[in-house]
Image (cartoon, rainbow, N blue to C red):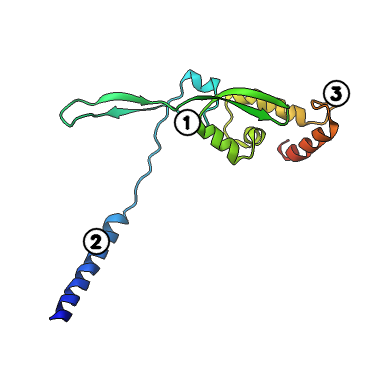
Amino acid sequence: MLLLLLKCFLTYLFFLFIWFIIIFSQKVVNVQIPLKYPKEFDEGLWGGEGVIQGFKKRHPKVRRFSHFWVPTLYKRVVYSEILDKRYEVTCTLRFLELVDKHYGFDNYILEVSYILEVLLEVRYVFVESLAPCTEAPIHKNIGIKERIFLRFVSFK
């Protein structure tokens, strides 16, 4: 009797496992969410984030209504080693995470594949300041300038 119950229980577990595999092994289609970029997007560094438009429904019997999800913007100061300057920028937490991931603001500007209008001018100044020139160096200590040049020379 006990063996029969054990056999039934194991059969039940086997079919439950097969059902679980069939249900949860189906592929999910990842559709990219369309983002909207307002004019404020070009004035700050959002790190690829944008405004998402969607619908909210509070109750099943009430009409849905349009809603916009906007990223939270912060004013932060970032430091550029190449230009030896601090910049106050309007940014998102994602931008700050990307700067940390790229080990600094300069690396982020030089490595990022998508360049915004805000960053084009800064990137141009970075590349120009990395080029060896006969003018007075940006830094007062020439040793620091040479170390920074050697560190970022691969981005030229």
Q: Quadrant of the N terminus?
A: bottom left
- Residue in view at x 49 percent, y 18 percent: 39
Gap between marks 2 and 1, in whole Å?
A: 39 Å
Amino acid residing under circle 3? Glu
Q: Position of residue 11 (x, y in %)?
A: 20, 72
Q: Residue furthest left?
A: 1
Q: Tag 3, which secondary structure?
A: loop
Mark 3 and mark 1 lie on one chain; the one further toward the N terminus is 1
Other residues around mark 1 within 10 Å, as few (<14) / some (14–19) / many (≥20): some
Q: Residue furthest right?
A: 134
Count how many numbered circles sit on residues in the image: 3
Q: Tag 2, which secondary structure?
A: helix
Amino acid residing under circle 1? Glu
Closer-to-camera residue (121/44): 44
Q: Quadrant of residue 127?
A: top right
Q: Quadrant of residue 3?
A: bottom left
Circles 2 and 3, Cβ within 8 Å, touching? The answer is no
Q: Compared to 14, does 36 lie above or below?
A: above
Mark 2 and mark 1 lie on one chain; the one further toward the N terminus is 2
Q: Position of residue 50 (x, y in %)?
A: 45, 28
Residue at image mark 2: 19
Q: Tag 1, which secondary structure?
A: loop
- Residue in view at x 54 percent, y 37 percent: 97
Amino acid residing under circle 2? Trp
| Left or right: residue 118 compared with residue 56 | right
Mark 2 and mark 3 lie on one chain; the one further toward the N terminus is 2
Other residues around mark 3 within 10 Å, as few (<14) / some (14–19) / many (≥20): few
Q: Quadrant of residue 114?
A: top right
Q: Compared to 4, does 93 lie above or below?
A: above
Residue at image mark 3: 135
Residue at image mark 1: 49
